[in-house]
Every structure is written in C-alpha cells, then in structure tokens.
Image (cartoon, coloured by chain):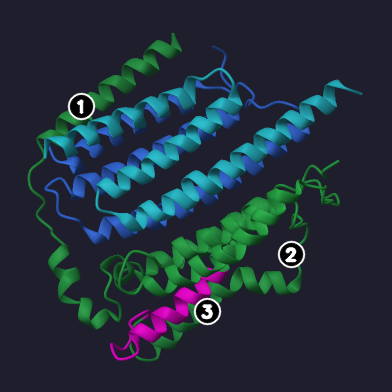
Amino acid sequence: MTSGLLFAIVGVLLFTMGGAGVLLLDHLLRRILAFNLMGSGAFLVLVGLAQRHDVADPVPQAMVLTGIVVAVAATALALALARRLHALTGRMELPEADDD
Amino acid sequence: MKRLVVIAAALAFSLALIATLLELPAATIDLRPAVAENLAASGVAHPVTAVLLNYRGYDTLLEIAVLLLALFGILALGLERQVCTLRAAERPLQLLARLASPLMVVVAVYLLWAGAWRPGGAFQAGAVLAAAAVLLHLTELLPGWLQPSARLRWGLAGGFLLFLGVATAMLARGALLEYPPAHAGALILLIEAGLTFSLGLILAGLFLFMTCDEGGD
Amino acid sequence: MSLALGFDLLLASALLWSAWRALTTVRLDHAVVVFIVFGLLMALAWARLQAPDIGLAEAAIGAGLSGALLLDAYGALRRREAERKAP
C-alpha cells in the first residue's frame, strides 16, 4: 500500500468522523472543530488519491493549498457568527428546530 | 436513536467509500505531463507555483476574493466595538516576540522569493506574516483592530486589486490571465508580492478584528 | 520500505486518534489543544505525501492561526460566562 492510498483512506475516515460530529454535537465550537476535520479529510482524499501510485501531482496540491486558506477564512467567519450568537443569546447551541 | 442512526450511516458510508478507493481504475486524465511540458513557458520553475499563479490563476484570484468576503462578513457582523487596551505582559515574552517578529518577516520574504523554484510562495509567506502579527498581539505589543482605517482598507484589498489589474491588462493581449512568456516570471512575482502583503493583513485581520469584541477589561 | 510504511501507519493512527479526541474530550480547551496537535500531524502527513508546500501552509495556518482563533474564541466564551455569573 502506498502512502497516498493510506492517507486517502485516513481522509475518508476523518471526513465521516467530522460529518458525524457536525450532526451529533451541540456545542458550536465543537461543531466548527468537526467541520474542520471534514475539510482536512477531503483534502487528504484529494491529494492522496491522485498520488496513489506514489508520484507527486502538483495540480491537486495547488488546489488543496488554496483550500486550506479558504478553510481558515470560513472557520474565522463561523467563529465570529458563533461569538455573536453567544453575545446575543448567551447560548452556544443552535435552537432546536425539530421535535425529537 | 439519532446518534445510532448517524453512526451507522457514517460507518456504512466510510466502508463503501474505502471499498471504492481500493478498486478504483487508473485515472484516464493525467495532468502531470501537461504541467511539466509548459513549465518552461510559465515563468517559474516550481510546478505548484506554476499551477497556482499561471495555469489556474482564476482559482487564486477568486480565492483572495473569497478571503476578502469572509473578512467583510466578520466586519459586517457588528461585533461590540469597545476600545482595546494593551495590558502589561511579561517582559521576557515581549523581548522574545520583538526578536522573533523581524525574523518572521525575513522568512516570509524568503518564502515569497523561493516560491519561484522550490516549495514556498505567496500563501505560506502571507501565513507567516499573519502569524507574526498574531504573536505581537498575544504579547500585548500590537493592539487589536477596531475599524479599518483608509490605509488599512487599501492594504487589505490591494493584493486582490493588483491581481485583478494585471488580469485585465492581459485581456488586451487576448485572454484573461494569460501572461506573455517573456514577462511571466516578473508578473508572477509582482502578483505574489501583492498577494503576500494582502494575505498577511487579511489573515491577521481575521484574528485582530475578532479579538477586540470583548473590549478587554 | 517497511520502515516508511510503519511510520505512515503510526502517523495515520495518530491522526485518527487526535481527531477522535478533539471531538470527544469532555473539556473544550483540551479539545482545542488536541485539534492544534491534529493540525501539526496533518503537516507531517503532507510531508509524507511529497507536498511540502501544503505542509508549510498547514503548519502556519491549520495549526497556528486556526489554533489562535479557536483559543481566543474559547477565552472570550469563558470570560463572558464569568461576567454573566458574577454581577
């Protein structure tokens, strides 16, 4: 098994772990963490899968480099929204919409 | 109940995806030869930089626009503006930060310059610049930002405007973002310098605009 | 070759473990610190994937800047909770 394939599999696991976290966790800060894990997983799949025969590929690498910078901007925006919500309502969870 | 369903679905999804990964046929498109062939005409010798700023310049142009939008979003949220005061920090810590931050600026310039032929480039250099600003803020040497002044606004938007300016100037020669091979290296370095400066300010701004909404003490 | 594979497996399990801990640790500040560790491990993974460019950016942004943002948000949260309780 090449390291590209191995890390692509790790990326899949990170993505699903993060996705489950986004769905199951209530605290917004933890949801943002989970969302970042999803992003990292997707990046690992993108680069790892392209390099599953162990040859470096600059195209997905450049895409992921762009993606990381956008991810931190999204994180900052999400944190600003969460902090605003906390300042206004004193809660760090989104209001429950459904009944269960 | 919800927990069980989500966990089961996540497990099934990851197993299916991993099974697919292991059985994947060879890719029909390979961009590596195309990248290598055109490297000589791209103006830089490092393939990742060539992809970022020449072949896929669109992505980078739109990316800096997205970053700017995220910053606008944070500013538009209207955090509680209160004056941030610098508290007294520990002297050794401040001394260390004072020593480290000029070095970080030097590292950023090196990364920018080295990006033409080896790992490095505008993104990493901008990140190091932003990290230097965050370090100075955490050691109470640099106050958080409240409202961007006119100069700061130009600094934040400058990289994007410069990139856009170069891109539209290329429009006169035929296509957006298609540099003449003879000047590609110089143009890329110019764009990267603007990007580094603005990226550093934007990434630092993501932190410094937000950290002030408490008003300190 | 087997040494490299061993290192990869170790790194992969460390990545998964730190991601898991970042989501399940009870204390939120610990979770954020574990997430910063995760970012640094990601930088190592990028180095293993022959992507030093991403590794550099990940170390500076994923671990450094995101960590500072998250810790700052956590600190603001704590301060505001304390203010709410105190007066």
Residue B182 located within the stretch drawn in magenta: yes
Quadrant the N terminus of chain B occupies: top left
Q: Residues within 10 Å of mark 2 (few under 14, many from 20)?
A: some
Q: Which residue is mark 2?
A: B148
The color chain B is rendered in: green
Measure the C-alpha gap from mark 3 to mark 1.
46 Å
Q: Could you tell me the amino acid type at mark 2?
A: Pro
Is most of the magenta stretch helix, strand or loop? helix
Measure the C-alpha gap from mark 2 to mark 1.
49 Å
- At 51% across and 63% down in the image, what residue appears? B126
Q: Which residue is mark 1?
A: B16
- At 13% across and 67% down in the image, what residue appears? B33
- At 56% across and 70% down in the image, what residue appears? B197
Residue B187 located within the stretch drawn in magenta: yes
The color chain A is rendered in: blue
Q: Residues within 10 Å of mark 1 (few under 14, many from 20)?
A: few
Output the chain of dot 2. Answer: B
Q: The chain drawn cyan is chain what?
A: C
- Would residue A30 be found to the left or right of residue B72 on screen? left
- What is the total number of numbered labels drawn onto the structure image? 3
Mark toward the viewer: 3 or 1? 3
Output the chain of dot 3. Answer: B
Q: Which residues are magenta?
A: B176-197
